[in-house]
């Protein structure tokens, strides 16, 4: 098998500005969960416990993002964690990391799309909940809601087919609308006549210690903040110096943490939060905004949710396709995935595959997708761990090594909280079944291609994955 010269390596076109990728990161961090799951966060930890858990998770993510920043500067390539795992631990670990992240990114696209159905059931329950098809795991699947999700994915897929610059511009507009809507909702809730600090009592969830609730929120930080790591996936398309990556990621994390906290506290400030989460409202945040701001507030909140859904679909569509492209370029996946559109400079076939999977997933029902996303948090934490270990392997200064060690320790801690029985974030049985199935599928797929992948010389694989020959960094 002949070596691939660096000049012949397929490469994406660098056209994205800092504002594009910063909006990409923040738009992915603040998905539908910020608005749909605030009631669940209150039930898990109480208002203060949820806010503290979110804040601590944000600080942990910034430490981890330091390692991402160093790796982006060193290896500004598509694939991010896949490439970093290869640099830190070799080709077999790159397979593990890439396989988990592929599922995580791919599952979040349809999860965001099906969140439109949750919004539809609150605003107009009779419009989309039509044409009952079947029930999966207790979740009713309606043709109208599937059509809504499929339309959203199709629209984003069409946007990506037109080129990445349009994707970046759309992300800037949608993210700006989302931030403005959250600010209006927060101001309205906190200044409304029904707002009262007394509604936050008890400050922590009853029946469990304060630290248990905080740790439960901290355990899902890889899920809450997943999205800042989509920025490194686009590193090959930066039209600016890669050293700006960390400040952009840090800004996205801090802004995301602030928005999470604002929405959670706003949800519980208008009505007593325990009564709110114990009620039968489909959407706790929607119920409290309707009480405080009326129809106008619900309209503003709906704008926030819709823009968050589309920024999430848009950002993770990009991240999924770039990861698959990188794995195809390395010949871990069929070379078909590594194809580039000669006109637009985008990963054409990886985009097609991402769209196809995302269009298929809504037919399985939202509950199944939620199980997959829950276990995908394990893959996200693995990506964080490999990135920090890779940053440690290239660090030359003591401070960089210390930050990488702290980041790796935090990442390992997330895995403990998710995977060790008795821990606050221990996953539910369906998520473990999904995880086992994905591991088995990955093992089967890998062993079918193991001989071909192993035959690629190290120097050539360095060039394909890292964009640098063997004597590079």
Image: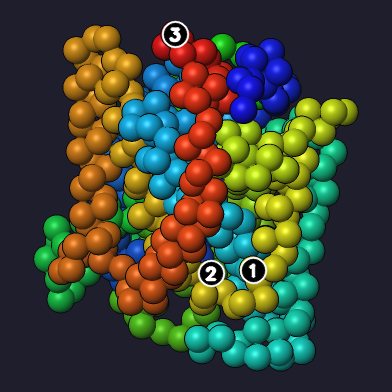
3 or 1: mark nearer the eye:
3
**Residue in the picture at 67% in, 60% down:** 358
Q: Are marks 1 and 2 in contact (CB under 8 Å)?
A: yes
**Residue in the picture at 76% in, 79% down:** 144
Quarter of the image with the C terminus is top left
Quarter of the image with the N terminus is top right
How many other residues sit within 10 Å of disc 3, few (<14), some (14-19) or many (≥20)?
few
Q: Are marks 3 and 2 in contact (CB under 8 Å)?
A: no
Q: Which mark sits nearer the N-terminus, 3 or 2?
A: 2
How many other residues sit within 10 Å of disc 1, few (<14), some (14-19) or many (≥20)?
many
As helix, strand or loop, the secondary structure at mark 1 comes to helix
As helix, strand or loop, the secondary structure at mark 2 comes to helix
Q: Which residue is mark 3?
A: 471
x%, y% of residue 25? 54, 37
x%, y% of residue 81? 45, 35
Left or right relative to 218: residue 223: right
Which is nearer the eye, 140 or 291? 140
How many other residues sit within 10 Å of disc 2, few (<14), some (14-19) or many (≥20)?
many
The mark total stands at 3
Q: Which residue is mark 2?
A: 369
Q: Which residue is mark 1?
A: 361
């Amino acid at each position: 098998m002949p070596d691939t010269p660096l000049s012949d390596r397929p490469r994406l076109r660098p056209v994205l500005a800092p504002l594009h990728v910063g909006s990409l990161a923040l738009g992915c961090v603040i998905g539908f969960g910020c608005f749909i799951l605030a009631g669940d966060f209150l039930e898990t930890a109480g208002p203060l416990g949820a806010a503290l858990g979110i804040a601590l998770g944000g600080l942990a993510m910034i430490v981890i993002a330091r390692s991402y920043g160093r790796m982006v500067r060193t290896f500004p390539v598509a694939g991010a964690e896949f490439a970093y795992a290869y640099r830190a631990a070799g080709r077999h670990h790159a397979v593990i990391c890439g396989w988990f992240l592929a599922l995580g990114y791919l599952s979040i696209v349809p999860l965001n799309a099906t969140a439109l159905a949750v919004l539809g059931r609150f605003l107009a329950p009779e419009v989309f909940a039509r044409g009952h098809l079947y029930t999966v795991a207790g979740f009713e699947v309606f043709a109208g809601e599937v059509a809504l999700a499929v339309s959203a994915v199709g629209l984003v897929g069409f946007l990506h087919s037109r080129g990445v610059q349009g994707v970046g511009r759309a992300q800037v507009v949608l993210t700006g609308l989302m931030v403005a809507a959250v600010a209006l909702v927060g101001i309205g809730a906190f200044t409304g006549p029904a707002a009262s600090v007394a509604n936050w009592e008890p400050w922590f969830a009853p029946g469990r210690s304060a630290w248990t609730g905080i740790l439960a929120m901290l355990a899902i930080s890889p899920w809450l903040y997943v999205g800042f790591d989509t920025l490194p996936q686009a590193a090959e398309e930066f039209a600016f110096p890669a050293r700006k990556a960390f400040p952009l990621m840090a800004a996205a994390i801090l802004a995301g943490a602030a928005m999470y906290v604002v929405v959670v506290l706003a949800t519980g400030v208008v009505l007593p939060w325990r009564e709110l989460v114990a009620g039968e409202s489909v959407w706790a945040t929607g119920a409290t905004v309707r009480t405080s701001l009326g129809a106008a507030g619900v309209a503003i909140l709906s704008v926030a949710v819709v823009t968050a859904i589309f920024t999430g679909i848009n950002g993770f569509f990009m991240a999924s396709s770039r990861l698959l492209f990188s794995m195809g370029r390395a010949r871990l996946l069929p070379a078909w995935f590594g194809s580039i559109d000669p006109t637009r400079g985008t990963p054409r076939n990886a985009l097609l595959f991402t769209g196809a999977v995302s269009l298929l997933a809504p037919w399985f029902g939202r509950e199944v997708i939620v199980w997959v996303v829950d276990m995908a948090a394990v893959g996200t934490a693995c990506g964080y761990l490999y990135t920090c270990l890779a940053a440690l392997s290239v660090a030359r200064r003591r401070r960089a090594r210390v930050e990488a060690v702290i980041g790796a320790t935090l990442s390992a801690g997330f895995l403990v909280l998710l995977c060790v029985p008795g821990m606050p974030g221990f996953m539910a049985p369906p998520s473990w079944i999904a995880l086992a199935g994905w591991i088995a599928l990955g093992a089967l797929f890998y062993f079918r291609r193991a001989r071909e992948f192993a035959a690629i010389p190290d120097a050539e694989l360095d060039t394909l994955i890292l964009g640098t020959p063997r004597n590079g960094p």
